[in-house]
């Protein structure tokens, strides 16, 4: 995945490469001398509030996505994704892009509406019978007759 490619989240949401800001830095952690020489840490920034990618969504869905992303945004409204997974900048770019896609997909997902259910009469009878059985076992354990 190249730095200047658009990110396809879904068919309806494609984040233009012009809205993405890449920064690279030296990554900490293991890697020996490589850590001191190579800027392998990839940082991807995107501002969803003013993005054309979300403009194609209906108002309700757009508001939903922005509200789900709100806790992850900086004060400036940017979503920052960092990847230091590998010692290779190119693979970290791809990983950061995949992380951004998964974050947006997770924000799109709406929870299923809960349908109230009720245990069947037979299930209640089984539960009560099991409770009585356990109580009987405990009562006989003490060794005295009640």
Image (cartoon, helix red, strand yellow):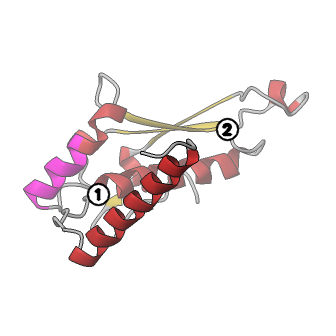
- Residue 8 placement: quadrant: bottom left
**Magenta region includes residue 59:** yes
Magenta span of residues: 58-67
Residue under label 1: 108
Q: Are marks 1 and 2 in contact (CB under 8 Å)?
A: no
Number of numbered markers: 2
Residue at the image position 45 percent from the left and 55 percent from the top:
136
- Residue 55 placement: quadrant: bottom left
Q: Is residue 22 left or right of residue 79?
A: right
Q: Is residue 38 visible?
A: yes
Residue positioned most to the right = 32
Q: Could you tell me which secondary element the residue under label 1 belongs to?
A: helix
Residue at the image position 86 percent from the left and 32 percent from the top:
34
- Taking depth in this image into account, of 65 and 45 the one nearest to the observer is 65
**Magenta region includes residue 113:** no
Q: Position of residue 60 (x, y in %)?
A: 10, 55
Residue under label 2: 84
Q: Position of residue 127 (x, y in %)?
A: 35, 65
- Taking depth in this image into account, of 85 and 107 the one nearest to the observer is 107
**Which of disc 2 and disc 1 is earlier in sequence?**
2
Q: Could you tell me which secondary element the residue under label 2 belongs to?
A: loop
> Which quarter of the rendered picture does the N terminus lie within?
bottom right
Q: Is residue 104 left or right of residue 139?
A: left
Q: Main secondary structure of the magenta part?
A: helix
Q: Is residue 121 left or right of residue 37?
A: left
- Tell me if residue 125 comes above or below residue 141 in the rendering: below
- Tell me if residue 58 comes above or below residue 49 in the rendering: below
Q: Position of residue 20 (x, y in %)?
A: 42, 44
């Amino acid at each position: 995945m190249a730095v200047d490619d658009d990110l396809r989240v879904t068919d309806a949401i494609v984040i233009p490469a012009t809205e993405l800001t890449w920064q690279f830095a030296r990554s900490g952690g293991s890697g020996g001398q490589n850590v001191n020489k190579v800027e392998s840490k990839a940082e991807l920034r995107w501002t969803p509030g003013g993005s054309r990618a979300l403009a194609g969504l209906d108002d309700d869905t757009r508001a939903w996505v922005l509200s789900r992303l709100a806790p992850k945004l900086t004060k400036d409204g940017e979503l920052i994704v960092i990847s230091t997974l590998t010692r290779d900048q190119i693979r970290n770019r791809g990983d950061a892009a995949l992380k951004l896609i998964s974050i947006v997909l997770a924000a799109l997902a709406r929870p299923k509406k809960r349908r109230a259910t009720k245990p069947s009469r037979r299930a209640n009878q089984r539960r009560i019978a099991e409770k009585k059985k356990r109580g009987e076992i405990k009562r006989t354990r003490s060794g005295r007759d009640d």
